[in-house]
Image: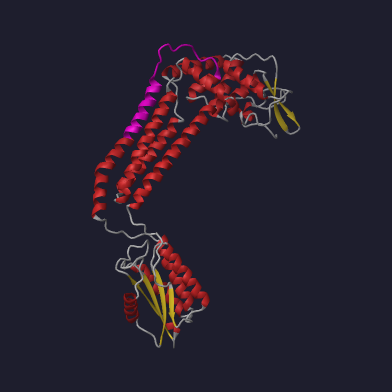
C-alpha cells in the first residue's frame, strides 16, 4: 500500500496508462486487422436464400427457420443458399453432387459478381421414399477459407448430422440443423491453416529477425533498469543522513519501505495505549472516544491525533467508520512522515520521481511493442506476437512493482537495525514502553500477527475495551 494522496495520484497515473494503452490499441490493431481479409464481413448475394421445387415441399415453419439461419450465415461472411428439390426416386450421392455442381454453375451464389466464393446446399427428396433423401454441398473455387468451415466438416454435416435424421422423415428439421451447423463451424470452429502470401512471408521474416530481438532486448533492459534502481536505493547513504529512529511507527515505515495504511491503523492502537483514545461500548456497538491531556511524544502521532479531533463529534466520539477510513483521513500525515524520513536519509528523496520516470519509459516500451504487433499480426508471425505480449506483460509487472517497492536506503536499514536491538534489550529488562513499541511495530509490519507470542490475553487498551489485535480488525458491532 501507499499513502492515500499517493494512492490517488497512483490511481490517476494507472488510469492514464490504461487510457494510453487503449488509445494505442485502438490505433494500431485495426491497422493490423485490415492486413487480413475480414472473413466476418456481411455479404449480400443476389441469389435467394431458399428455393424449393415444388414451393410447398417443406413446412412453412421450417422454411422460415432456414431463411433466418442462412441470413445469419450471410451476416457473418458466408455467401450461402439452400435449394430443395423433389425427385421421383432415390438418387446416388454422386449424382446429387453433380446436380449441385451444375446448379451452382447455372445460378452462382457469390458475394459479388465473379467472386465464385459461395456455398450451395442441394437436397433432393424422393417422392416415393423420403427416408432416402440425399444432400450435397458445392463450394465455389474461392470459397475457402471461411472461418472454421472445411470440406471435412461439410461432409460431417451431410453424413453424420443430416443423414441420420432422414430415417425419421424429419427432412425440414434435418436441413435446419445442417444449416445451423454451417454457421456454427464458421464462427466457432478452429480456422484451418492457410499458406502465407509473399507479403505475409516477408513480414514474418522481418518481424522475427528484427522486431523480436528488439522487443526482447527492450524488455530485458527495462527489467535491468528497474533492478539497478532498486539496488541504488537500498545501497544509498545520503550525505548528511542523521538522527535515529525514535518511534515504532517510524521503524515500521522503514521496514515496509513506504508509509502505508498499516501505519495509520497501528497509530490507533498506540494512541489507545497512551490514553489519547478509549474504546467504549454502547450496547453492541464499539466506539472510539478522544481523551484530553494525553502525553504524545511522537510528532506523527500528534498529527494523527489532531486529524481525529477534526472528524470527531462534539462529544469527542469518532464516527463509526473512522477506523475503516483512517487511511484516507491521515493521508496528508503519512505524506509528511515520508518526507520526514527522506530528510533524515532513511528514505530515498527521489524515489517517487524515479518511479514516474520508470513508468514513462514503460509506456514508451509498450508503444513500441504495440507497433510491432502490426507486422506480427499481418504476417502471422507467432514469435513476434509472443515477443510483443511478453514485453507488454513484463513492463506491466515492473510498473506494478514501482508502486510497491521499498524506498528505504542503507542508512534507513542501519537505523532500523539499531532501533530493533535497543528495543529488544529494553524489552528484555521488562520495559513497558519497549513492550508496547514491539507490539505496535508488529501490528504495522505484520498486520494481524503480534510479534510477542507471549502477549497476555487480558491486556487491554482502555477500560473494558478490547485488544490491539481486535482494534486492527476494525470496530463496530461486537
Q: Is residue 210 or residue 288 the one in the foreground?
A: 210
Whether residue 107 can be seen here: yes
Q: Position of residue 403 (x, y in %)?
A: 46, 30
Q: How is the image coloured?
A: secondary structure
- Which quadrant would residue 91 be assigned to in this image? bottom left
Q: Position of residue 205 (x, y in %)?
A: 24, 48
Q: Position of residue 309 (x, y in %)?
A: 66, 21
Q: Quadrant of the C terminus?
A: top right
Q: Is residue 317 or residue 449 the one in the foreground?
A: 317
Magenta region: 220-248
Q: Is residue 34 magenta?
A: no
Q: Is residue 222 magenta?
A: yes
Q: Is residue 228 or residue 47 the one in the foreground?
A: 47
Q: Residue at x 44, y 28 (%)?
A: 405
- Which quadrant would residue 206 be assigned to in this image? top left
Image position of 81 with respect to 397: above or below: below
Is residue 21 left or right of 291 when viewed as pictured?
left
- Which quadrant would residue 333 be assigned to in this image? top right
Amino acid at each position: 500500500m501507499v499513502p492515500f494522496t499517493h494512492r490517488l495520484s497512483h490511481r490517476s497515473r494507472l488510469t492514464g496508462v490504461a487510457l494510453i494503452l487503449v488509445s494505442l490499441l485502438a490505433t494500431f490493431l485495426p491497422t493490423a486487422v485490415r492486413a487480413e481479409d475480414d472473413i466476418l464481413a456481411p455479404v449480400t448475394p443476389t441469389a435467394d436464400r431458399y428455393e424449393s421445387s415444388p414451393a410447398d415441399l417443406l413446412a412453412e415453419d421450417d422454411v422460415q427457420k432456414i431463411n433466418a439461419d442462412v441470413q445469419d450465415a450471410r451476416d457473418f461472411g458466408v455467401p450461402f443458399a439452400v435449394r430443395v428439390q423433389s425427385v421421383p426416386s432415390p438418387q446416388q450421392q454422386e449424382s446429387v453432387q453433380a446436380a449441385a455442381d451444375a446448379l451452382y454453375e447455372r445460378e452462382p451464389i457469390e458475394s459479388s459478381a465473379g467472386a465464385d466464393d459461395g456455398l450451395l446446399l442441394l437436397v433432393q427428396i424422393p417422392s416415393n421414399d423420403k427416408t432416402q433423401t440425399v444432400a450435397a454441398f458445392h463450394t465455389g473455387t474461392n470459397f475457402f477459407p471461411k472461418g472454421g468451415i472445411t470440406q471435412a466438416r461439410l461432409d460431417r454435416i451431410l453424413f453424420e448430422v443430416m443423414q441420420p435424421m432422414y430415417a425419421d422423415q424429419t427432412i425440414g428439421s434435418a436441413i435446419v440443423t445442417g444449416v445451423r451447423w454451417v454457421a456454427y463451424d464458421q464462427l466457432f470452429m478452429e480456422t484451418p491453416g492457410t499458406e502465407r502470401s509473399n507479403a505475409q512471408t516477408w513480414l514474418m521474416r522481418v518481424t522475427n529477425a528484427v522486431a523480436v530481438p528488439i522487443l526482447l532486448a527492450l524488455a530485458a533492459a527495462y527489467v535491468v533498469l528497474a533492478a539497478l534502481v532498486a539496488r541504488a536505493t537500498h545501497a544509498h547513504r545520503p550525505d548528511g543522513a542523521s538522527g535515529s529512529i525514535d518511534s515504532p511507527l517510524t521503524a515500521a515505515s522503514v521496514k515496509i519501505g513506504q508509509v502505508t495504511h498499516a501505519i495509520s491503523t497501528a497509530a490507533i492502537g498506540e494512541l489507545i495505549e497512551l490514553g489519547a483514545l478509549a474504546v467504549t461500548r454502547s450496547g453492541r456497538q464499539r466506539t472510539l472516544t478522544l481523551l484530553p491531556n494525553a502525553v504524545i511524544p511522537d510528532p506523527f502521532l500528534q498529527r494523527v491525533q489532531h486529524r481525529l479531533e477534526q472528524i470527531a463529534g462534539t462529544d469527542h466520539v469518532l464516527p463509526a467508520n473512522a477506523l475503516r477510513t483512517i487511511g484516507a483521513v491521515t493521508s496528508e500525515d503519512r505524506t509528511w512522515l515520508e518526507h520526514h524520513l527522506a530528510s533524515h536519509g532513511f528514505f530515498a528523496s527521489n524515489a517517487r520521481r524515479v518511479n514516474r520516470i520508470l513508468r514513462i519509459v514503460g509506456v514508451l516500451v509498450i508503444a513500441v511493442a504495440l507497433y510491432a504487433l502490426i507486422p506480427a499480426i499481418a504476417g502471422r508471425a507467432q514469435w513476434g506476437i509472443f515477443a510483443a505480449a511478453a514485453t507488454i506483460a513484463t513492463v506491466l509487472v515492473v510498473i506494478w512493482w514501482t508502486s510497491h517497492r521499498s524506498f528505504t536506503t542503507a542508512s534507513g536499514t542501519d537505523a532500523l537495525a539499531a532501533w530493533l536491538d535497543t528495543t529488544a534489550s529494553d524489552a528484555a529488562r521488562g520495559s513497558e514502553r519497549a513492550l508496547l513499541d514491539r507490539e505496535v511495530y508488529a501490528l504495522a509490519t505484520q498486520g494481524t500477527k503480534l510479534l510477542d507470542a507471549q502477549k497476555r490475553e487480558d491486556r487491554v487498551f482502555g477500560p473494558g475495551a478490547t485488544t490491539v489485535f481486535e482494534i486492527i480488525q476494525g470496530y463496530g458491532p461486537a
